[in-house]
Amino acid sequence: MVAIFSHLFDPLTLLAMLGGIALVAAFQNGMGPLGRALVALDPLFSADPSRDRDAARAAMLKIDQVAQLRGLACTDRVKTASPFLTDAARKLANCDTTEAFEIWTVQELTDRAQRHGAVHKVWLSIADAAPALGMAGTIIGLVGMFAAMEDPASLGPSMALALLTTFYGVVIANIIAAPIAARLADLSERELAWQREAADRMLAIARRENAPLRRASIREVA
């Protein structure tokens, strides 16, 4: 059994497959998204949207209390571990109008969704490219076999190339890339859900705190 598995690892063939897949993914998506797709492997294992959601809800209670006691200008004093909440609290404290904060939240969440979608698309591209390149390697191996029919010693390497590239393509597509794409899509959906919830809560706070100012402005005009 160990001997069989040892034959399944051919560094040169594997590197050629990975290089070809990376080129295809780069051509389809660009180098930037490809780099972010590799960086996304870290949160793939460390991210916990449920924990982040609970922490965000606790932070929102503090932001709400600060807004009621000291006003919106002090909401950025609430410290959070989430870069999104930190930026949102700072924007809430510095925005002149509720509409400006609402525009910022819509743009920020839209940009985040697009970045997540681009990373997800890269892994889907890898899952699509791997079997195709594996099939290309199989064809190359078969051509080598037929070209060397008169030399039985040359048949083995060509057959190995034909089978290994198919094997690598199936493994990379179905055991690596596709599960990663599915996991990242799930994490993105859950992360954006709590971020939208936090943004909506902040927007409600901004409207509540700005309402007396608006009513006072209307009375002054009248």
Image (spheres, helix red, strand yellow):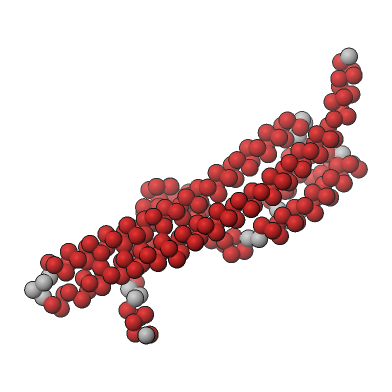
- Can you give x and y, in whole percent of width and height, for residue 220 in the image? 89, 18
> Is 138 placed left or right of 149 in the picture?
right
* The N terminus sits in image quarter: bottom left
Horizontal side of residue 129 vs 180, given as left or right: left
Q: Position of residue 81 (x, y in %)?
A: 73, 56
Total residue callouts: 0
In the image, is residue 164 above or below residue 208?
A: below
- Which residue: 22% across, 63% down? 140
Q: Name above or below for residue 164 compared with residue 74.
A: below
Which quarter of the figure is the C terminus placed in? top right
Q: Residue furthest left?
A: 150
Q: What is the x, y in percent for residue 119?
A: 51, 51
Residue at (15% x, 78% y) in the render: 153
Can residue 19 be seen?
A: no
Farthest residue, direction top: 222
Image coordinates of residue 165 in percent, x first then y, are 31, 66
Residue occupying image coordinates x 13% and y 67%? 146
Identify the image quadrant of residue 12: bottom left
Q: Is residue 137 visible?
A: yes
Residue 111's image quarter? top right
Q: Nearer the viewer, residue 78 or 171?
A: 171
Asked which quadrant contains residue 42, the reply is: bottom right
